[in-house]
Image (cartoon, helix red, strand yellow):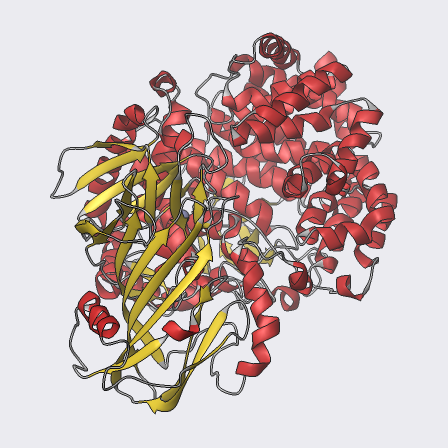
Amino acid sequence: MGRRADLPASQAQSVSQSVMSWWLFAVAALTIAGPSLAKKSRVPAFRLNEDVVPLHYHVTLVPKRDCTFSGTVAIQLDVRNSTDELRFNSRELSIDPSSVALSSLKNDGEEVDIVQLEKDLGESNYNLDEGYKNLTLDFPGREFVTVAVGEPLQSPGRYLLYMAFNGTMNSRRTLGLYCTGTRHRNRTSRWFAASAFEPNLASTAFPCWDEPGFKAKFTISLAHDNQTVTLSNMPLKESKPYDDGEDEGWRLDTFHTTPKMAPYLIGIMVSENIAHLDSKLTRGRKVSIWGHPSRVQYGDLPMRLANRHMEFLEEYTSFNDPMPKQDMLTVRNYIAGGLENWGIVSYDEKLVLFDPRYRRNKQVVLRASNLIAHELSHIWFGNLVTPKWWDDIWLSEGFSSYFAALSTSKVYPVWGHETTSWIQARENSMEADARDTTHPLRPDVSPGSGFKEVFDQIIYHKGQSIVRMLNFTIGEEALKEGLRSYLKERAFSTASHEHLWNSLEKAARKQGSLPGNITLSEVMDGWMNLRGYPVVSVNRDYQTGEVTISQRSILDKEDETSPAREETGGGWWIPLTFTYDGENGTSTTTRFWLDPSETNTTITDPAPSDRWLLFNLHGAGYYRVRYDRENAGYLLNDLSDLWLDDRVQVVSDMVELARLGFSPVADAMKAMSWLKDEISPYPWLALLGSAHKTLSLFKGTELEDMFTEFMNEILSAGMNRVEDDDPHKKQLVALSCEIGVKKCTEMAKENFKKWGEDPSFKIPDDVRGSVYCYGVANGDSKTWQLVNSRFATTTDMKDKKDLLKALSCTKDPKLLSKYLSWAMEPSKGGPGLKKTSIMFKALAKRDPDMLLSALVSKGTAFKRRNLRWKRLLEHVAVEVNNEQQLNKLKAVLTSGKDEFKSELGSSALIRLAESNVDWLEKNMGETKAWLQLHKKSVKV
Ligand SMILES: [Zn+2]
């Protein structure tokens, strides 16, 4: 699943009581519960200890139409270390103290029927012979409950804990235990309650050991009225009448017991007016899709895709999904694209149940296929084998992202999809990884330092890129064999990265694809634990034939000659591959390893001195290469002769390394201008992001017009060639319309006019944002009002986002300052606090100066209102490009009361902005000279 968020630790106190994001509670609990628990814990205060572990839960939930719920839970516990207290998670639940009962179980080692046991416990009024008395409950924070037991629980020993509780469902977001449809009284509304628990919101629905490492079996019972149907992870076992004390006709549905799994994967649904389609039984399992009766008819394609992905993934992993059924639950305006609840995966409705008309658009089908494959890959990576703690979550998300692309390329083979996927993963993660605000692939996941880092570009896209690198380095066969044994060994249990390295290493040794003197664990250490990525410098001596190779971190901005290693904490084991102009064959087998402890390595005569030398074939390694000028020149002259993947990595490295101050601007400009003749969409896909960022660097400087003119010439060529299915179309159109490429603005003008006259006119998704922005920028206040009113009424959340962003495109200063006040003071009108991030990012791009001035005057109130103010300020820090703006940013960061004085992240934001200013100072002259020369050559 995917989402981004963050939280400054200093502001946990101001979190509202509602069910919001989980990390908020995590921090609140740390500050309140921490000290009182310190005496007992051998683990950090925000973690649970392993003295007592749950084996089996029976959870009964009674969700009501007013979005409240009640429930009971019986948990069979295994005591590993004698203890006099039970500590578990309960977030925002109210537990009835008189209901809490604890009994010891005589059959220590045996599997028990937990539903039967719970009944015995209930019927005997919780006073079994073995029952504990005088239990006291303590709520040391909103995260935890501690039950003091009196006499210690024996180890080894089995116990049964029972509790009754109630709570409120989330009616604002599809997060936690949520319910929708209560506010609308029109005919199409329906009542719908379901769950989205990842990463730790299961404990907002029932008290539990809510960490991924505490895997257990679950038996789920759901009570519901006769207008509704239920679903959960497993198939229905029995349905009986249920007396809720008020209404007639209620039933209690109990589902079969799940395999051992993490609590965050529990899925439940109670809904009225929901329809489903079933596929034929395939390999003993039924796939069904559930959704709104008006949409579910479009479910045949997603079901077919799901079946084929399951087939591919079961074959690859050599491990069949243990779930007897696979439901695809579609949800309107879902919190994420999808969520991998085992046996009942949730999807955002419009991403999978789209009108068959759109099947002609390959990008739409690819997006659905990729999403379905990603969620289904989690069956193996996350569900079957679960990372023990969130710091290894890349084992779930990185692998699922990798297999989403691989499986899609087999199941829905559209030429180039794997290429698109690796380019996007590489460019997205390298962009984030080159910023001072980045974090390692294995982040420090604790409330103070970064729960926010659990689901971001680094985890998903760097994770995917690292798996791709492994696939090339140890070989496809070794990766497959190693993964098969990793899954077999760790199935129904947890894993850390070390388990993975052990399995992969054995397989790699068998294939002979790893040198004898290093372990895979050593090789991967830098890739796991260092921030940033390596820049490999290749310097040739054309007289002697010697080539000197060295590495340096992208975060190390100092001069090459200065000692680089201390700040970034060492280096990487880098698998190097290379070829030269005229060499036969281009094997991606590692030719040698660059050792992190050596400053540089020399190779002799790898290529004739008048030919180019090319490293990192197919961009397989997660690093960028900087060549000496002469070799860069050879490569630039020969770009069209390179294999596509190599063309992509060469130009992308040249342009990005120049933008980050590592290599000469002239080479980057030449690489960019070459795009004009490039007919493949992939180099465009790789370069458009860099081009956009370079354009913002020049904003407001004397080079803005010259660079815009240069880009116009390139993008016009691109716009003439782009086709509807091209993966780079959205980015190309966004940049082209922004700088006024004629073909783009004509398209936008026409579409905006039609949309203005007819609200039901559908602008294609991939150009919609650009069309709105063009319309607002070239319209008057009436146009702005029209867009604003459509923003207020549309129910499509992605459309809403595009409309809101477009409102910032206005050239009317009065309207822009109105927009600014919406972002700065949401209580005084506008779309509200939750939309601040969208508006803030739009404003930072549109007019960073204006935004910074507003922040300087109202910064303290702004920070108090926005828990995520540092993330918001990152949007403006990346746009800063002069001293005045830099000073304003510094003033904003250091202003305010003590509560904002935490240095965490502030210095990184300042460095981010400073690097832009420094870059311009160093490179303006060279860029100007190049552009002038280019202009002349074009005229000639
Ligand atoms: Zn995922």
Instruction: Tell me where residue 127 appears, x and y as whole percent.
Output: 27, 81
Classify residue 29 as left or right of residue 384. Answer: right
Q: Examine the rendered structure and indicate whether residue 292 appears above or below residue 555.
A: above
Classify residue 598 as left or right of residue 298. Answer: right
Query: In the image, what residue occupies the spot 68% across and 57% down?
Result: 560
Q: Examine the rendered structure and indicate whether residue 222 appears above or below residue 900.
A: above
Q: Is residue 515 visible?
A: no
Query: In the image, what residue occupies the spot 46% across and 31% down?
Result: 642
Query: In the image, what residue occupies the spot 36% across and 16% down?
Result: 357
Query: In the image, what residue occupies the spot 33% across and 77% down?
Result: 101
Instruction: Tell me where residue 844 appears, x and y as whole percent.
Output: 73, 38
Instruction: Tell me where residue 215 appears, x and y as whole percent.
Output: 31, 66
| Quarter residue 514 falls in | bottom left
Instruction: Tell me where residue 241 appears, x and y as whole percent.
Output: 21, 50
Q: Examine the rendered structure and indicate whether residue 219 appears above or below residue 112.
A: above
Q: Is residue 352 visible?
A: yes
The front one of 465 and 149 is: 149
